[in-house]
Image (spheres, rainbow, N blue to C red):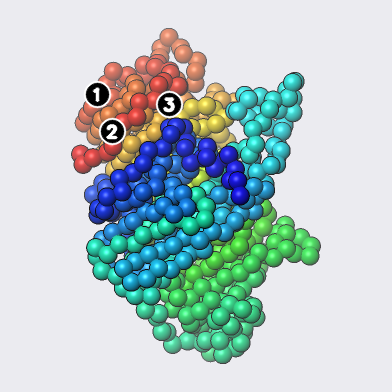
């Protein structure tokens, strides 16, 4: 078969011809988000696995990247680099500690007409060789929002302005030539494998491509514990099939009803349970044998007619009752995997891993893959705890606290390869309040932001590690947009670490900051404080404050407070201000800055009195980045040359 030219372009990225990697045996460095773990100490999620990047492993394949250009394989790889194997080539990892389970993040080509293919990958150890069957059925999206899996499709919105021709194609004569496939993205997927025995530190695991070009991004290895045995109501006794051959939804529902009646837990034993619709949960605990051992897996099913909520499909998911029906309470889900079958984005579809409204509830230790959104909660609801979950390969968000979610927490979650904001709080129509995202790790969101807050009261984003956002967003974001209620009370970003953040915004044609605040539908009424963050190797700015052009004279971003921050490497400025307002800076240290320390455009009125954005120096701002631009010197250059900084290091 002749593989699409698209693959070649995506593999090479903007850096041109790839170079062969060193094939000599060597140890493989352990990283966190492709970063020296010492640089992320104390931040991010605590996870059971160790990450090793393929570009640091022994291989006779080809290293691709580093490259941050959207729509390329390197850009979506962890650390912006990976290894491509032609059939027969290999990459070999040396285990850093004992392990009996691995996760491989990879990309293989799409079918020429879309829809994906499958291909074998040999996994060889000193004891045996096994085969993983890789698939691209859940990757390779194209075109404009909400995207398509057809590489041959015409523009979904020819009446939208696009940067490729800097025009509205439908209104342009002669019509521009649009290269197909248009905007390929979402290249990667991952697969897990229990090895059947425990291997020692120093043992090697070799991955060999067999039939198609195969890009390996990384390998996670861990020592998975034995299946947990818990006293509880077993759905197998109600007819559930742990082989996965027969649908188990009804049997699980019967077990849930009985467990509620006798006030016991539901225990899902080891096995694969087929579920192709929602399991509605209320006042019940459902626990598995561990997310390596208990898998609830389903197909996406087309509905005969649209549901009242607009869904045209259903699929596997555990849902609380709708808030309009009173919601659910006292739901506790833990220690199993949810694997869906979502291959396209239809925003009205309720095909999420966990959904509905759940108050006074917990979700802990789940592995959620191939659903639309890992967990999407529609409030009003309160006191939800989302902890210790792995959420990967989502078509849209990883987690969203949506509409009137209060007093809730997401902590120690690991989120990788989402198709929209990885973690979001969206106060649409009803304000969220008192919510916290703490000690989470986010890697490679292919669209939008790592962590995003849209309105709400008394919000905290703390101790998170966010790496490698790809396009139309960045690592940390707060915005008055999407019909959200205003920001009130406090908004805190505290002790977060970002790395290789800041993307090129296609419509504005400028780079975003690692953290960016955006005023579109109002100003920021909250007390906004950013304290203790570290912004490492930012592609463009470290900090960006921006108002949409059409409302720049209406709204301002005022009285922000930045303190105890370290900026290690920016492609352009430390601060870019494209709005009216003000901010103070105290102990904000910067080094390896690629352009002027401050890009201050204000409202673009350029009055003789200086920019409409004012800067206050509260002392201790080392690196010389701030003083020349006080208090409001106009230094408006939105598109300076990008100077790639050296890699970050200990301060």
* Residue count near mark 3 (Cα–Cα under 10 Å), binned few <14, some 14–19, many ≥20: many
**In the figure, is residue 93 to the left or right of 330?**
left
Q: Which mark is residue 624?
A: 1
Q: Is residue 289 visible?
A: yes
Q: Which mark is residue 98?
A: none
As measured in the structure, the alpha-carbon distance from the residue carrying label 2 to the one carrying label 1 is 18 Å
Residue identified by numbered label 2: 646
**Is residue 552 depicted above or below 270 in this figure?**
above
Give the residue displayed 44% in from the left and 71% down from the top: 291
Q: Nearer the viewer, residue 188 or 595?
A: 188
Q: Check the picture and name the quadrant holding the C terminus.
A: top left
Q: Earlier in the sequence, mark 2 or mark 3?
A: 3
Give the residue displayed 23% in from the left and 40% down from the top: 649
Q: Nearer the viewer, residue 552 or 46?
A: 46
Give the residue displayed 45% in from the left and 21% down from the top: 639
* Residue count near mark 1 (Cα–Cα under 10 Å), binned few <14, some 14–19, many ≥20: few
Residue 329 rendering spot, x and y as whole percentages: 53, 72
**In the figure, is residue 167 to the left or right of 538?**
right
**Is residue 416 depicted above or below 645 in this figure?**
below
Q: Nearer the viewer, residue 519 or 83?
A: 83
**Is residue 133 depicted above or below 162 in this figure?**
below
Residue 495 rendering spot, x and y as whole percentages: 31, 47
Residue 397 rendering spot, x and y as whole percentages: 53, 52
* Residue count near mark 2 (Cα–Cα under 10 Å), binned few <14, some 14–19, many ≥20: few
Q: Earlier in the sequence, mark 1 or mark 3?
A: 3
As measured in the structure, the alpha-carbon distance from the residue carrying label 1 to the one carrying label 3 is 18 Å
Residue 333 rendering spot, x and y as whole percentages: 49, 72
User: Picture quarter containing residue 570?
Assistant: top left
As measured in the structure, the alpha-carbon distance from the residue carrying label 2 to the one carrying label 3 is 25 Å
Q: Earlier in the sequence, mark 2 or mark 1?
A: 1
Residue identified by numbered label 3: 577
């Amino acid at each position: 078969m002749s593989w699409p030219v698209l693959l070649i372009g995506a593999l090479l990225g903007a850096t041109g011809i790839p170079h062969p990697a060193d094939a000599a045996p060597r140890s493989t460095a352990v990283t966190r988000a492709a970063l020296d773990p010492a640089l992320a100490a104390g931040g991010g999620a605590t996870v059971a696995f160790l990450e090793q990047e393929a570009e640091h492993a022994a291989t006779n394949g080809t290293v691709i990247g580093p490259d941050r250009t959207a729509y390329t394989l390197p850009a979506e790889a962890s650390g912006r680099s990976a290894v491509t194997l032609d059939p027969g080539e290999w990459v070999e990892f040396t285990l850093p500690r004992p392990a009996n389970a691995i996760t491989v993040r990879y990309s293989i080509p799409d079918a020429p007409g879309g829809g994906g293919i499958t291909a074998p990958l040999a996994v060889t150890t000193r004891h045996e060789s096994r085969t993983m069957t890789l698939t691209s059925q859940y990757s390779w999206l194209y075109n404009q929002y909400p995207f398509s899996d057809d590489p041959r499709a015409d523009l979904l919105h020819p009446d939208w302005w696009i940067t490729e021709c800097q025009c509205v194609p439908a209104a342009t004569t002669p019509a521009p030539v649009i290269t197909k496939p248009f905007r390929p993205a979402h290249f990667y997927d991952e697969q897990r494998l229990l090895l059947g025995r425990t291997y020692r530190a120093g043992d090697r695991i070799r991955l060999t491509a067999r039939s198609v070009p195969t890009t390996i991004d990384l390998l996670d290895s861990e020592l998975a514990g034995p299946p947990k045995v818990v006293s509880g109501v077993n759905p197998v006794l109600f007819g559930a099939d742990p082989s996965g051959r027969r649908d188990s939804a009804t049997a699980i529902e019967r077990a849930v009803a009985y467990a509620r009646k006798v006030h016991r837990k539901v225990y899902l034993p080891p096995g694969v349970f087929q579920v192709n619709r929602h399991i509605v949960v209320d006042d019940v605990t459902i626990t598995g044998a561990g997310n390596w051992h208990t898998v609830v897996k389903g197909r996406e099913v087309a509905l005969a007619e649209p549901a009242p909520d607009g869904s045209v499909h259903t699929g596997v998911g555990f849902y609380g009752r709708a808030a309009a029906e009173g919601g659910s309470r006292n739901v506790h889900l833990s220690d199993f995997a949810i694997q869906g079958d979502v291959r396209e984005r239809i925003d009205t579809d309720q095909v999420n891993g966990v959904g509905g409204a759940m108050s006074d509830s917990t979700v802990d230790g789940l592995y959620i893959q191939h659903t639309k959104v890992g967990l999407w909660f529609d409030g009003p609801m309160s006191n939800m705890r989302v902890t210790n979950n792995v959420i990967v390969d989502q078509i849209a968000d990883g987690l969203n606290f949506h509409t009137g979610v209060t007093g809730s927490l997401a902590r120690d979650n690991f989120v990788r390869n989402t198709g929209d904001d990885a973690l979001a709080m969206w106060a649409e129509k009803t304000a969220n309040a008192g919510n916290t995202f703490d000690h989470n790790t986010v890697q490679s969101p292919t669209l939008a932001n790592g962590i995003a807050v849209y309105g709400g009261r008394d919000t905290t984003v703390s101790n998170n590690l966010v790496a490698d956002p790809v396009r139309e967003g960045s690592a940390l974001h707060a915005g008055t947009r999407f019909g959200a209620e205003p920001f009130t009370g406090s908004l805190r970003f505290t002790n977060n670490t970002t790395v290789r953040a800041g993307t090129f915004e296609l419509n504005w044609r400028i780079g975003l900051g690692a953290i960016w605040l955006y005023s579109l539908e109002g100003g920021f009424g909250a007390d906004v404080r950013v304290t203790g963050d570290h912004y490492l190797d930012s592609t463009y700015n470290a900090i960006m404050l921006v108002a949409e052009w059409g409302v720049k004279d209406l709204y301002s971003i005022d009285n922000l407070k930045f303190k105890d921050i370290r900026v290690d490497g920016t492609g352009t400025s430390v601060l870019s201000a494209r709005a009216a307002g003000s901010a103070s800076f105290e102990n904000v240290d910067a080094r390896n800055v690629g352009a002027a320390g401050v890009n201050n455009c204000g409202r673009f009125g350029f009055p003789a009195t200086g920019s409409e954005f004012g800067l206050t120096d509260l002392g201790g701002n080392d690196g010389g980045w701030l003083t020349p631009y006080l208090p409001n010197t106009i230094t408006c250059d939105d598109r300076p040359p990008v100077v790639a900084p050296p890699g970050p290091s200990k301060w």
